[in-house]
């Protein structure tokens, strides 16, 4: 019985993985906007009904890559004893480094619309994670610190991150990941200073 309940989970994970890989390989060959679901199905060797069981459309499939990226960097999430602000900003450098590696490996031809889809979903996922971190790690902030609702502060951090990410991706001269991460933090840290007191 236990064996039977685990098999579908593995099948689901495998199907989702091959669909993501198929989309990524197609994006290396042609612009995201030119890709149709049938091409993804053919490349992944997956049926139409299996695709629509997991994803509404190719945008949702692309967005699922965010969880894959964030899931591949859990070891960078700081422990309780680390710098308090790192508990909020732990994601930034690993994401910049991941995208830098992607770019060096040939990059993805997302195009403006594909990038917009990915970055919109990234902003939402990050805002949720950041808000959770703020609530968990800073429950009793100092009374002298201005009270900004965690959700609003999280939206501010996530939208600033995506703003910097867009600037970095669209730029002609690309600073290395550590440098662009420093730029992001220089924009955010003044806002977070009251939390570190």
Image: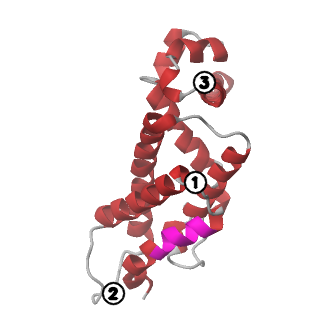
Where disc 2 sits, the SS reads loop
Relative to 70, does residue 48 appear above or below in the rendering? Answer: above
Circle 1 is placed at which residue position?
Answer: 172
Label 3: few (<14), some or many (≥20) within 10 Å? many
Circle 3 is placed at which residue position?
Answer: 19
Where disc 1 sits, the SS reads loop
Decide if residue 1 is in sight here: no
Q: Which residue is nearer to you in this view: 50 or 59?
A: 59
Indicate which disc, 1 or 2, sits on the residue closer to the N terminus.
2
Indicate which disc, 3 or 2, sits on the residue closer to the N terminus.
3
The residue that appears at 62% across and 63% down in the rendered structure is 175
Indicate which disc, 1 or 3, sits on the residue closer to the N terminus.
3
Residue 117: horizontal and vertical position, in percent? 43, 38
Where disc 3 sits, the SS reads helix
The residue that appears at 60% across and 77% down in the rendered structure is 82
Query: How much space separates mark 1 and mark 3, taking CA atoms?
Result: 31 Å
Residue 192: horizontal and vertical position, in percent? 40, 77
Q: Which residue is nearer to you in this view: 159 or 176?
A: 176
Read off the magenta span: 179-186
The residue that appears at 66% across and 27% down in the rendered structure is 25
Please tell me whether mark 1 or mark 3 is closer to you in this view: 1
The residue that appears at 62% across and 11% down in the rendered structure is 42
């Amino acid at each position: 019985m236990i064996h039977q309940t685990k098999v579908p989970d593995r099948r689901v994970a495998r199907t989702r993985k091959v669909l993501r890989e198929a989309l990524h390989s197609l994006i290396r060959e042609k612009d995201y906007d030119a890709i149709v679901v049938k091409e993804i199905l053919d490349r992944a060797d997956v049926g139409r009904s299996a695709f629509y069981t997991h994803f509404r459309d190719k945008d949702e499939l692309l967005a699922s890559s965010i969880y894959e990226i964030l899931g591949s960097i859990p070891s960078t999430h700081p422990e309780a004893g680390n710098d308090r602000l790192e508990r909020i900003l732990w994601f930034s450098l690993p994401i910049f480094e991941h995208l830098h590696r992607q770019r060096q490996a040939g990059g993805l031809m997302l195009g403006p619309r594909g990038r917009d889809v990915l970055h919109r979903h990234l902003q939402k996922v990050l805002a949720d994670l950041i808000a959770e971190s703020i609530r968990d790690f800073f429950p009793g902030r100092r009374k002298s610190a201005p009270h900004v609702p965690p959700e609003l502060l999280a939206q501010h951090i996530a939208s600033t991150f995506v703003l910097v990410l867009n600037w970095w991706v669209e730029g002609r001269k690309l600073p290395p990941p550590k440098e662009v991460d420093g730029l992001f933090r220089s924009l955010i840290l003044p806002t977070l200073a009251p939390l570190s007191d």
